[in-house]
Image: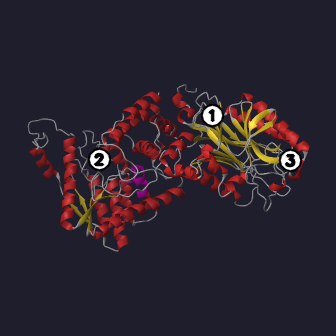
Amino acid sequence: MAQSHPFHSIHSHGLIRVGACTPAASVGDCAANAAATILLAERGHKAGADLLVFPELNLTSYAIDDLHLQTAQQQATEAAIAAVVAASATLRPVLLVGAAIPRNGRLYNCCVVIARGRILGVVPKTFLPNYREYYEKRWFASGAGLGGHITLAGQDAPFGPDLIFAASDLAPFIFHAEICEDYWAPIPPSTYGALAGALICCNLSASNVTIGKSRERMMLSAAQSARSICAYVYSAAGPGESTTDLAWDGQGTIHELGELIAESKRFDPDPEILLGDVDAGRIAQERMRNGTFNDAARLTGDPETRFRRIAFEHKPDFADLGLLRTIRRYPFVPNTPEKLDADCYEAFNIQVEGLLKRFVAARAERLVIGVSGGLDSTHALIVAAKVMDRLGRPREHILGFTMPGFATGEDTKANAWTLMRVLGVTGAEIDIRPAARQMLTDMGHPFGQGLEGGGEPVYDVTFENVQAGLRTDYLFRLANQRGGLVIGTGDLSELALGWCTYGVGDQMSHYAVNSGVPKTLIQFLIRWCIKTDQFDRDTDRVLAAILGTEISPELVPAGADGALQSTEARIGPYALNDFFLHYTIRHGLAPSKIAFLAWHAWKDAEAGRWPVDFPPEARAAYDLPTIKSWLEKFLVRFFITSQFKRSAIPNGPKVSAGGALSPRGDWRAPSDGTATLFLEELANGVP
C-alpha cells in the first residue's frame, strides 16, 4: 500500500519523473501518429511521469521529404496537435511533441510543449542539417533569433528558441527543449537554456541510425548533461518511419550530470516509454557549488535576461511513486567491473605518487609505519612498498612496527608480522603495555593501580587513548632517530566520524596517505591489488586474511564471550556511513533526502548495484528506522564532535571525486559548529 507521508514522494526531494517515448511511427499519417502519441501519454500518466519527450516530427512524420510542403499534410498536422492537446487535459505529464508548423510564410521543424489542455509554447529548431543524407533546408526555416507568438490549434502560444518552462508549484521542474541537430552544434541551444536556468534539457530527435551512431548520441547526451550541469532526455525516432533511404532504431536515453540514468531498447517493434527519475534538486545544488557555471552565464551575456520563462501549474499530488533510478549502495565505488578496475588503478597510484613526492621532498631516509594487521595500516604499508619499488630503493627502508597493547589479538598480530615479512620490510615489535601501565599509574587511573582489591577494570576513553597515543609517540621518536617519515593510516571515513584520536596516528602523521580514501574503497583497493597481481602470492594470501578480519580498534579486551571490540557496532556500518558522507560533502543534500536515497538503496537485500565480487555485506538490508538512527548519529559525529580534528590534519592526497575533508581542499567548516538544524530537518522530514 502506498505510503502517505511526504517523505515517500520523489517530488518532496526534488526528483522529476521524465520519459523518452518511442511511439509507433507512420509515413505521414498524422491521425495515426496522434493516436500513438496519446497512447504513450496515457501510459506515462499511469506511471506518474511529469515530462514526456517524443521524437522529432513525431506527429507529422520525419522522412516524408517534399510532402512537408503539401497543404493537406500541414492541415493534418495541426489537427493532430489539436487531438493531443484535447487528450492532455486530464493527463499529468507535460508533453513535448514534434511537428512541422507554418508561420509567416515559412515552415518550421518544431517542438510543441503541451500541458493539461494548453499549448505552453512552440520551440523551432535552430540548426538544420543540409549535408550527406539531410536536406532540411529544402523544407524548413531556422528559428534562430525569432520570438513573438503563434496561433496554433485555436490557441495563442509563445514561439521561439528563447523559451524555458517552469512549474509554478514544483520548484525544480524547469526544462528546455531543442531538436536533433541542435545538440550536434558546437554550442547547442540547450547550453544557453541551462545557463538561463533550465535543469532538464530535452532533445526531440529523428536521427536515422548508422553503425556507431548510438554511441555518438550517448556521448553527446552524457557530455551535454555534464558540461551544462543538467539532466538530458533524448528520444530518437523508431520503427514505422520511412526506410526509403534510411533506418531508425528508437534510441532513448536519460542522463544526469554525465551519468546514464536509463537507456531504452533499440530496434524494438513495440511502442516504448523509457522512464527515469532525475534529481533536479541535486542539479541545482551542483550549480551553486560550481562557480564556473555562473561565470559562463555572465560571459554569454546572462541568458536568463533574454529567455522567456513560461510558467505553468503542474499540480503534483506528492504521492508515493516509488523510485525509478538505481541508487548505488557504495557511491565511492564504481558499479561495473571495468570502471572498478580503472578507478582502483587510479586511486592506488594517486596514493603512491602522493607519498613518493612527499618522501623525496622531505629527503627522508626511511618510511615509518605502525602495522596493526587491520585494513588501514595494511593499505598504507602496501602503498609504501610500491613507493620504494618505484624509487628503486630496498623495501627494508620501510620500518614497520607492531605495538601490541592490552587487547591486541593474536590473529591480527600474526597477520601484521606475516605481512611485513612477505613484503620484505624491516619489522620490529614494541610492547607498549609496560609504558601504558606506567602512564595510567602516574595518572591515578584505576587500571594502572592494579586490580588487587577485586575492583572491576575500567576500560574508558583514557584507557584506550593512552595506548593509541603511546604508539604514535614511539613512531615519531623512531622517525627522529632513524631519519624517517611517519605514514598516517587514518582513512576518510574515520575522519568524517571523528573515529580517530586527536594527535594520534589515525589523525596525525607526517603524511596522511589514506586520508582521501573511504573505508569501503580501501577494501576494494586491497582486493584490486590481489586481483591484478601487484604483489606475490604469499602477500595475496595475507591480504585476503586481513580482508576477512572484523574491523576493530583492539583497545579494549574481548568480553567473556570472546567477542572483539566492534567498530561498526559502535559507530554504525561503514557502508551506510560512507553513503551518508558522500551525499553530505559532495552534494550537500538535506538529511531527509539522504535518508530517502539510502532507504531506496538498502531496503531490499536484492536491490542496489554492485559488481559480482562485492563482499557479502553489500547485500545487506536496512529498514528506515535503522537508517534514520545511524544517520542521526552520523550527523552528530560529523557536524559537532569531529571538525576540530579535521581542521588539524596533515597533508594527504585527494583521491575520490566524491570529496575530501582537508581544510585546504574540499571541506571547510567551523570547529565549533552545530548540528541542530540538520537533526531537526531529519526529525521533521523522516517518519
Binning the other alpha carbons within 10 Å of mark 2 as few (below 14), some (14 to 19) or many (20 upward) gives some
Q: Which residue is mark 2?
A: 645
Question: In terms of secondary structure, where does tag 3 sit?
Answer: loop
Q: Which residue is mark 3?
A: 27
Question: Type of residue at label 1?
Answer: Ala
From the viewer's perspective, tell me whether residue 208 is left or right of residue 450: right
Query: Along the polypeptide, which appears first: circle 1 or circle 3?
Result: 3
From the viewer's perspective, tell me whether residue 333 is left or right of residue 29: left
Q: Comparing marks 1 and 3, which lies closer to the viewer?
A: 1
Instruction: Find residue 399 and report its horizontal and vertical position in percent.
Output: 25, 65
Q: Could you say which is closer to the camera, residue 516 or residue 128?
A: 128
Instruction: Find residue 373 and report its horizontal and vertical position in percent.
Output: 30, 55
Classify residue 384 by image quadrant: bottom left
- Specify whether residue 93 is painted magenta: no
**Span shown in magenta:** 515-526
Q: Which residue is mark 1?
A: 167
Residue occupying image coordinates x 54% and y 39%: 281
Query: Along the polypeptide, which appears first: circle 1 or circle 2?
Result: 1
Binning the other alpha carbons within 10 Å of mark 3 as few (below 14), some (14 to 19) or many (20 upward) gives some
Instruction: Find residue 261 and report its horizontal and vertical position in percent.
Output: 60, 46
In whole angstroms, how far apart are the C-alphas of marks 2 and 3? 68 Å
